[in-house]
Amino acid sequence: MRLMTVLLCLGYLLTLSHLSMAYGDDNNRRDQEEIRVVMAAAFVSGHGVSVYDDIFTYVGKKIGRKVNFVSGFSYSTINKMLEAGMADIGFVCGLPYVMKQDESQSSLELLLAPVMKDSKYQDKPIYYSYLIVHKNSKFNDFTDLKNSTFVYNDEISNSGYNMPRDYLINIGETSGFFKKTLRSGSHEESIRMIALGEADVSAVDSLIYDYDKAKNPEFINKTKIIKTLGPAGIPPVVVSSKLSVSIRNKIRNIMIEMKNDSEGKVILEKALVDRFITVDDSNYNGIRQMKIKAEDTGYVVIR
């Protein structure tokens, strides 16, 4: 299965590369072609990834365009795809967004951000990082975790790496807190590893954890949250600057109005999302400041 996934992803990248070369910067022509959407960070878990397909099938019908949606790429790969115009819209993590946005010539722009239904999100475009352990673990507080095994999803994940790294800096634990660190590749895999006792602690996206708790709790039920970090700016929806302004505006308006449309509202309910809103770059300043602090203190790699 993994080999098949890799081959499919490679095939998709080659196809997109060909399309990018064929269309170049001809926005008029591109505006007649399919919308290409990619997803790395999510407001649902992998079990609910079809929600994204539902969203953009809905958007595609509204604007009369076919939408090609894919997932399974790393955060850095999706940034490169958006930068090259090989993808038009991306659901991305806040940290990769900040990293790309702070480059001298960024090719990404904020399109929208979701506001989740759960009251803990304060009706704002925010989310949290949950520090989780096995439900029967002896660990009940972060200080208990000294010399434990930490698993994370990706080094440029905000909730999985940036936020716990910042917490370690703030409590003065930068000389080697964990006995071992492991990279899982996804929040879902981190949760599974904790549930099966393959690691002691992980920092996971609250949106993914909440979704699986509501919809697919098999592994969630074997874990417990011992600390909540945040809030931080929620993973945004970004758009490549190579997509024309007129199409961007149409998509933005359609997604904002989903909450007022019966079909759109059903899709939002499935995703536990209240609505999409426009959001300013300042929503991600907290993420930006944590990253800068890590660089300034020299504690970039969690250990």
Image (cartoon, rainbow, N blue to C red):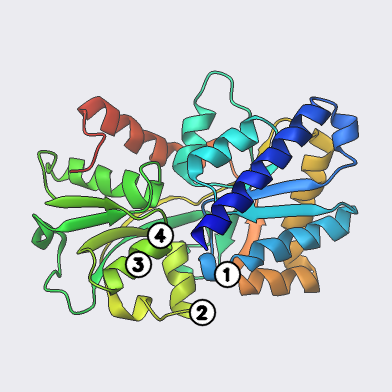
Q: Which residue is mark 4?
A: 187
Q: Which mark is residue 191?
A: 3
Where residue 77 appears, as percent x and y from the top left, is 54, 39
- The answer to whether marks 4 and 2 mark residues whose Cβ atoms lie closer than 8 Å is no
The residue carrying pointer 2 sits among few (fewer than 14), some (14 to 19) or many (20 or more) residues within 10 Å by Cα, namely some
- The answer to whether marks 4 and 3 mark residues whose Cβ atoms lie closer than 8 Å is yes
Distance from disc 4 to disc 2, alpha carbons, whole Å, reads 16 Å
Q: Which residue corresponds to the image point at 52% horizontal and 50% vertical from the top-left?
A: 235
Distance from disc 1 to disc 2, alpha carbons, whole Å, reads 8 Å
Q: Is residue 173 left or right of residue 286?
A: left
Q: Is residue 67 left or right of residue 231?
A: right
> Of the residues shown, which amino acid type is indicated by label 2?
Lys
Q: Which residue is mark 2?
A: 215
Which of marks 2 and 3 precedes in the sequence? 3
Closer-to-camera residue (18/125): 18
Closer-to-camera residue (17/197): 17
- The answer to whether marks 1 and 4 mark residues whose Cβ atoms lie closer than 8 Å is no
Distance from disc 1 to disc 4, alpha carbons, whole Å, reads 13 Å
Distance from disc 1 to disc 3, alpha carbons, whole Å, reads 16 Å
Determine the secondary structure under disc 3.
helix
Q: Which residue is mark 1?
A: 48
> Of the residues shown, which amino acid type is indicated by label 4?
His
Which of marks 2 and 1 precedes in the sequence? 1
Q: Is residue 275 above or below residue 270?
A: above
Is residue 87 visible in the rendered structure shown here? no
